[in-house]
Image (cartoon, grey):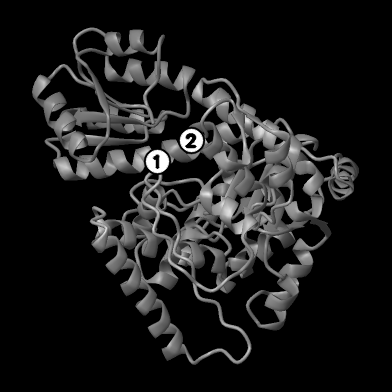
């Protein structure tokens, strides 16, 4: 993320804002004049710009005009004295994100900067998504059918429903449909409806007016307005709340919507592409998804095959991801030996293409040497493939170089298995035995190793149960979203979706 620029000739104001933002772990860069900031724009840009109006030389309004002319997506917050209120209002109308009247409350200033930062990051995601669309690769017959469907739909504005397992590449197909459509020159905007809290999703989709609810201090455009003239991709549409399904149905029916708190009907010129890993017909029968909305979305259905259905594509995908990962890190791309490539081609990959991509990133960072053998792959992956299912045992290997402990094997139930109480007692006895062995061998950090194994096992099974969705897994485990994100990073767990 880029730094926040603070432009003010008053050193005390610069100091106060720098310290307050530093406490929020936000990087800053300060300038004592608008001229200095304008010169710095030749070499870089801020994520958010905070500027005083009255300064020696060029004014904050001139700086605002310069920024908006060259970089219209950068939010600009104007600092003004009460005597300059008219100027501040003019600046606000001319493109400023908001204004701060002196003297201002530091906490409120930080809150305002935070909101501007969120808006800036949303716009950045949209721009980068359009500029960094990865290729869709595949030679398997199932993927050739997908390519043919994209070609047939290339000149159409019809609504498309993409189905397929998590990680199979539904957003890539949506981007390809947009790229080859008459709307290609207009925005492509993506929204994962399962990743946004229910009470914020309506505002995220349709925007809100200033004062519509507590904290709505400025009007904000929703995703429909951001995608005007282009394509709106709604991922995980099956998880959309019923009341919002009704609003979405109206937009698809007559093309009109209202911002939250608004009274003026807005016309949407947007092509909608939806995607889900769920069976919408079942959701309709269960009363969780509107049947009329289902039929509105299901004009053209495009099913993406899982990676195990096109295992012949694994070699070309693996080589592509290894090349991409090496380019991002500025290193030479690693190569998979024929044996390692054959080994990967026989894996199930329940996380599909996303899991393969994460594995290639791991290989680029962790695998020794340029040619990667089977033994260089993640140990749990090798053990899962090489060893047939066997009675549960606890692996006492220490943490790997990445700090990720080997996972605890879980006891499996078969027909006629013992009751739950016996199973629970079994794994606890195994844990006690393992701990006793580690303590007897004077292995250090026993609590940390076993604790990390236990946490990793719980999180992995929760992610598997929720098809990789972190938010749902956190709810099922009874922990916070930030906690599960931190644990996934610390434990090096793959297969989780970025919510």
The quadrant in which residue 139 appears is top right
Identify the residue at image location x=57%, y=55%.
383
Q: Secondary structure at mark 1?
A: loop
Q: How many marks?
A: 2
Looking at this view, name the residue that lies furthest to the front.
Answer: 441
How far across and down, in percent of the image, does residue 432 sit? 31, 73
Q: Which mark is residue 366?
A: 2
How far across and down, in percent of the image, does residue 420 sit? 46, 89
CB of mark 2 within 8 Å of CB of mark 1? yes
Residue 131 in sight in this render:
no
**Up-down relation of residue 75 to residue 435 (above or below):** above
Instruction: Judge from the rendering whether residue 306 lies leftward or rightward of residue 125; answer left or right.
Output: right
The quadrant in which residue 450 appears is bottom left
How far apart marks 2 and 1 lie (CA) works out to: 8 Å
How far across and down, in percent of the image, does residue 465 sit? 55, 69
Mark 1 or mark 2, which is nearer the start of the sequence?
2
Instruction: Judge from the rendering whether residue 260 lies leftward or rightward of residue 303; answer left or right.
Output: left
**Up-down relation of residue 313 to residue 430 (above or below):** above
Identify the residue at image location x=75%, y=35%.
316
How far across and down, in percent of the image, does residue 221 sit? 50, 45
Near-viewer residue (322 or 497): 322
**Up-down relation of residue 80 to residue 426 (above or below):** above
Instruction: Judge from the rendering whether residue 208 lies leftward or rightward of residue 268; answer left or right.
Output: left
Would you call the spot at circle 1 few (<14 residues within 10 Å), some (14-19), or many (20 or more)? few
Near-viewer residue (29 or 445): 445
Q: Secondary structure at mark 2?
A: helix
The residue singled out by tag 1 in the image is 401
The quadrant in which residue 100 appears is top left
Looking at this view, name the residue that lies furthest to the left.
Answer: 12
């Amino acid at each position: 993320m880029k730094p926040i620029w603070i432009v003010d000739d008053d050193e005390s104001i610069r100091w106060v804002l720098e310290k307050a933002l530093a406490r929020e772990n936000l990087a800053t860069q300060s300038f004592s004049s608008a001229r200095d900031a304008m010169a710095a724009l030749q070499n870089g840009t801020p994520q958010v710009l905070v500027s005083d109006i009255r300064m020696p030389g060029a004014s904050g309004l001139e700086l605002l005009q310069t920024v908006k002319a060259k970089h219209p997506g950068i939010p600009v917050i104007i600092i003004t004295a009460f005597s300059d209120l008219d100027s501040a209002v003019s600046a606000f109308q001319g493109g400023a994100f908001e204004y701060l009247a002196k003297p201002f409350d530091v906490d409120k200033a930080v809150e305002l900067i935070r909101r501007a930062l969120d808006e800036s990051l949303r716009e950045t995601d949209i721009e980068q998504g359009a500029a960094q669309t990865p290729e869709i690769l595949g030679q398997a017959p199932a993927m050739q059918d997908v390519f043919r469907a994209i070609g047939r739909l290339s000149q159409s504005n019809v609504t498309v429903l993409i189905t397929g397992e998590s990680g199979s590449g539904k957003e890539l197909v949506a981007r390809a449909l947009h790229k080859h459509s008459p709307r290609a020159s207009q925005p492509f905007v993506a929204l994962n409806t399962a990743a946004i809290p229910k009470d914020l999703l309506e505002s995220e989709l349709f925007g809100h007016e200033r004062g519509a609810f507590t904290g709505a201090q400025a009007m904000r455009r929703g995703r429909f307005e951001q995608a005007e003239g282009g394509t709106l991709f709604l991922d995980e549409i099956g998880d959309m709340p019923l009341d919002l399904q009704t609003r979405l149905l109206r937009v698809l029916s007559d093309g009109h919507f209202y911002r939250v708190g608004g009274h003026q009907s807005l016309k949407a010129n947007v092509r909608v592409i939806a995607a889900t890993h769920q069976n919408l017909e079942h959701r309709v029968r269960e009363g969780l998804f509107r049947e009329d909305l289902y039929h509105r979305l299901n004009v053209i259905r495009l099913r993406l095959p899982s990676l195990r259905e096109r295992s012949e594509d694994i070699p070309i995908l693996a080589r592509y991801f290894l090349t991409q990962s090496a380019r991002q890190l500025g290193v030479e791309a690693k190569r998979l030996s024929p044996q390692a490539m054959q080994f990967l081609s026989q894996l199930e990959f329940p996380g599909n293409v996303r899991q393969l991509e994460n594995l290639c990133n791991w290989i680029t960072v962790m695998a020794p040497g340029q040619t990667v053998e089977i033994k260089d792959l993640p140990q749990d992956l090798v053990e899962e493939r090489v060893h047939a299912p066997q009675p549960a045992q606890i692996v006492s290997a220490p943490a790997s170089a990445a700090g990720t402990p080997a996972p605890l094997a879980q006891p499996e139930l078969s027909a006629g298995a013992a009751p739950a109480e016996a199973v629970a007692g079994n794994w606890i006895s195994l844990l006690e035995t393992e701990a006793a062995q580690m303590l007897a061998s004077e292995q250090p950090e026993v609590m940390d190793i076993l604790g990390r194994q236990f946490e990793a096992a719980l999180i992995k099974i929760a992610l598997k149960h929720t098809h990789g969705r972190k938010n749902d897994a956190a709810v099922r485990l009874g922990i916070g979203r930030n906690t599960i994100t931190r644990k996934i990073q610390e434990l090096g767990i793959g297969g989780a979706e970025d919510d």
